[in-house]
Amino acid sequence: MGASAREIERQINETRDRMDENLTQLEGRTKSNAMRYGRIAAIGLGVLAVAGAALLVYRRLHRPTLRDRLDDLSLDRLRSLAADLKDKLPSVTVRVNEKSEEEPGTVESILRKVAPALVGTAGSALLERVATASDDQYTAPQAE
């Protein structure tokens, strides 16, 4: 029994050693595969970033002119685009110097702001003219 127990123990140790070697190899493969896939992903992202930047630069430098864009449009497409825009745009009414009940026109609003100053200035000038008599003209006759 002793010899068979030693034999079994030796076989168990050999099996453990083989299993340890196999596990070490598998761990090494896993690490190398992870590194490989990480590098592939990094290279792919780098290529994608460079391609995106190149596309943006290309589009920035080679913009189609308005004439090129209009040449690409068909007449039917332009008509449908105009009809779509007509429905979406709000209507605007511009009134210049039109009398309305809500607010005065441009000229009238300016006159309303300037008129008090003009009337005040004219009144002050008239009062000054009347109040002060000049020495040269219209002197009252003097008794001798």
Image: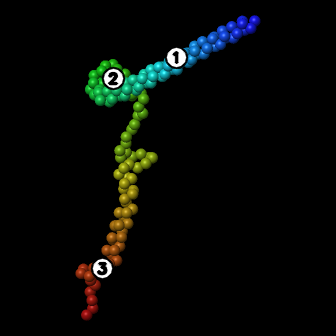
Q: Which of 117 and 136 is in front in this view?
A: 117
Element type where label 3 sits in the image: loop
Q: Rate crowding at label 1 as few (under 14), some (14 to 19) or many (20 or more) other CA atoms within 10 Å.
A: few
Element type where label 1 sits in the image: helix
Return the residue found at the far right: 1
Quadrant of residue 61 in the image? top left
- For marks 2 and 3, give the CA distance: 79 Å
- Residue at the (28%, 84%) spot, across then down: 140
Q: Nearer the viewer, residue 78 or 128?
A: 78
Q: What residue type is labelled 1?
A: Arg
Marks 2 and 1 in Cβ contact (< 8 Å): no
Marks 2 and 3 in Cβ contact (< 8 Å): no
Return the residue found at the far left: 136
What residue is disc 2 on?
A: 78
Quadrant of residue 144 in the image? bottom left
- For marks 3 and 1, give the CA distance: 119 Å
- Residue at the (74%, 8%) spot, across then down: 2
Element type where label 2 sits in the image: helix
- Residue at the (39%, 23%) spot, across then down: 47
- Eye-nearest disc, 2 or 3: 2
